[in-house]
Image: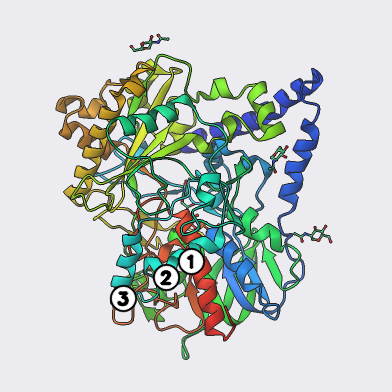
Amino acid sequence: MFQSEATMELEAIWLLVALQCLKSTQAQLRTGILENTPYMLLDMLKQAADEPQDTRKLLKEYDFIIVGAGTAGCTLANRLTEVPEWKVLLIEAGGPENFLMDLPIVANYLQFTDANWKYKTEPSNKYCLGLHNNQCNFPRGKVIGGSSVLNYMIYTRGHPKDYDTWAAMGNEGWSYQDVLPYFLKSEDIGIPEYAEDTKFHSRGGYLSITYPPYRTPLAEAFVKAGLELGDKYVDYNAESMIGFSYIQSTLNNGTRWSSSRAFLHPIRNRSNFHIKKYSTVTKIIIDPKTKTARGVQFVKNNRQYVVRAKREVIISASSINSPQLLMLSGIGPKKHLEKVGINVIKDLKVGYNLMDHVALGGFTFLVNASVSLLTERILTGNAIGEYLGYHLGPLSIPGGCEAIAFLDVGDNDGYPELELLFQGGSVISDYTIRENFGITQEIWDAVYKPIQNRDSWMVLPMLMRPKSTGRVMLRDNNPFHKPLIYPNYFEHQEDLDVLVAGAKKVVELSKTKAFQKYGSKVHDIPLPPCEKFGFGTDKYFECMMRHFSFTIYHISGTCKMGPKGDPTAVVDPRLRVHGIKGLRVIDVSIFPKIMVGHTNGPVFMVAEKGADMIKQDWGIET
Ligand SMILES: Cc1cc2nc3c(=O)[nH]c(=O)nc-3n(C[C@H](O)[C@H](O)[C@H](O)COP(=O)(O)OP(=O)(O)OC[C@H]3O[C@@H](n4cnc5c(N)ncnc54)[C@H](O)[C@@H]3O)c2cc1C
Ligand SMILES: *[C@@H]1O[C@H](CO)[C@@H](O)[C@H](O)[C@H]1NC(C)=O
Ligand SMILES: *[C@@H]1O[C@H](CO)[C@@H](O)[C@H](O)[C@H]1NC(C)=O
Ligand SMILES: *[C@@H]1O[C@H](CO)[C@@H](O)[C@H](O)[C@H]1NC(C)=O
């Protein structure tokens, strides 16, 4: 009851924001300040219209069927249709991307729309305790572009050791040296000083990477604070990650550069490419005798369709839906499938190995100057006009994320355990943020209500190399029922220790000259359930972690890649499902171990490499 009321309220707010945008622009127009705005608006709408149109005449058979038009699916659709004689169908459960989704600052609003699957974890007594019903929200994109449309546009690749570890786990061809060319293949670097570093960056790919055109003085303070404490400024996508940096983002001229904008728009005219939107794949059709994938079954407008695949079916439905679809189709843990009444075709560890980057949420610092990203202050006619006219100003900041630090808080081996994600605002800066995570009213009133509308900043200390892993399971055999999700955060004490070290580092940063220029002060009203430990003690931070366990949305690993003979592997190092012919999984769920940083960049890489492997396996030169 409460949940759905809150959601309706938020959808109303989202609409109001959109209207407010348009109204202010109109007001500006009336005063004649921004004569060119209508053209700019039209231009943005036209961009949305550049999305490939839904295919009217579905063929009975395609060479390849790709399930899910997200980060991986869009990339694959582009690369596979480069082969003119291959007919490719891309099937997506969600609808088209719209121009409001391009506006970087409103990223957190998109979670309240139908572009989100709106998953929740099962209630826990160990984590997410300060969130509605002890459940963590797990948003996932349900729209052309997938989660790259909901995401915060942070572009990172991971540490070389991440991929060398993948290779050491038996995944031939996945070492850092092997994967770096695929990062470079996609990239179009728009940061002038990095464009010269051709070892680690490249120009001319589909994926535009830039700095956001605007930053708050607080972001500068964060980077300066790091230098003051003796850390370095680094390009975290180059030689060494350790240090402080402004965020490199998937932005093109101040607008979101989703996987669809990057990879699908340019191929809208390819005659060998078909796409179906609002179409949910409910089953992979597998011949139980030959164990070969023959096609898929999907539902659109309550009608069921079957379409055949001549060569391969590729699952790119991401870390929750890919394992769900495999299990619904009879590929998964035998006992579990039998329990929910599904015929087992292949017994594999589908749904295990769920990994995420969890962060300490809500850690807020107050300042005494008007320098933060308060929504009320930045959603003015001026800022909207500046954005619509020139793609500049505070609305071009990706959901408030501005700077990042990767830190080695363990054994000084140059391999970070911790990320600090800096935001030029906090949970109090915008009404919706508390609902993104679902902070309970009780805690909100006690801790944050007293400081509402103040200027503030926040750092999310994030666990980079979690020891704890979780699992996705079917609720039942109905493809339209949401699966059960158990992230199992903090099964290992070491995971908490890293975050406690992170929280202390943030306190240290707040005391530097750079942050004291703005009178930064930790907001020290304790969370009522943690008050007994004394604000700021190790035990306090551990308690805060268990209450405000914020996902950073990097859910991965649930269809693990591993060689033949690895009993935990679902796909082999060429991303083929073990024991099934004509079926691959290519998306974030194949990560055998989660990398350091944010997952979107690595998923583009996985898809680029996957596309090349498919071409090689069918005798096409790459
Ligand atoms: C709110 C949020 C913020 C994030 N912020 C960042 C960030 O700043 N930086 C970063 O690097 N990463 C970020 N991420 C993570 C990153 O975006 C994802 O890891 C990445 O997009 C995953 O790519 P994918 O191809 O695996 O899946 P997705 O991009 O999620 O695509 C899967 C697609 O499959 C579709 N689908 C699923 N099931 C079916 C079905 N049965 N039938 C048809 N279609 C189906 C879905 O609707 C979706 O469009 C964020 C994610 C979220 C949700
Ligand atoms: C697609 O075709 C239309 C009409 O011929 C053309 O205007 C448009 O530029 C083409 N788009 C791309 C991306 O090639
Ligand atoms: C960026 O977008 C603005 C607003 O639409 C436009 O005026 C400008 O020319 C664009 N710049 C580039 C380099 O494309
Ligand atoms: C903010 O606090 C700092 C440090 O206490 C002080 O130097 C500065 O003058 C204050 N600024 C304002 C606007 O009060």
Which residue is at a point 63% across and 21% down the rendered structure image?
Answer: 380
Mark drawn on residue 181: 1
Mark 1 Cα shell of 10 Å, populated few (<14), some (14-19), many (≥20):
some
Label 3 to label 2: alpha-carbon separation: 14 Å
Which mark sits nearer the N-terminus, 1 or 3? 3
- Which dot, 1 or 3, sits closer to the camera? 1
Using the rendered view, name the quadrant where residue 9 is placed: top right
Front residue of 234 and 30: 234
Position of residue 93 in the picture relative to residue 363 (left or right): right
Amino acid at the residue labelled 3: Gly
Amino acid at the residue labelled 2: Asp
Q: Is residue 18 above or below residue 291?
A: above
- Which dot, 3 or 2, sits closer to the camera? 2
Q: Dot 2 corresponds to which residue?
A: 178
Position of residue 589 in the picture relative to residue 8 (left or right): left
x and y percentages locating residue 436 in the rendered image: 45, 37
Label 1 to label 3: alpha-carbon separation: 20 Å
Label 1 to label 2: alpha-carbon separation: 7 Å
Front residue of 20 and 42: 42
Using the rendered view, name the quadrant where residue 58 is placed: bottom right
Number of numbered discs? 3
x and y percentages locating residue 210 in the rendered image: 55, 45
x and y percentages locating residue 476 in the rendered image: 41, 63
Q: Dots 1 and 2: beta carbons under 8 Å?
A: yes
Front residue of 158 and 263: 158
Q: Dot 3 corresponds to which residue?
A: 170
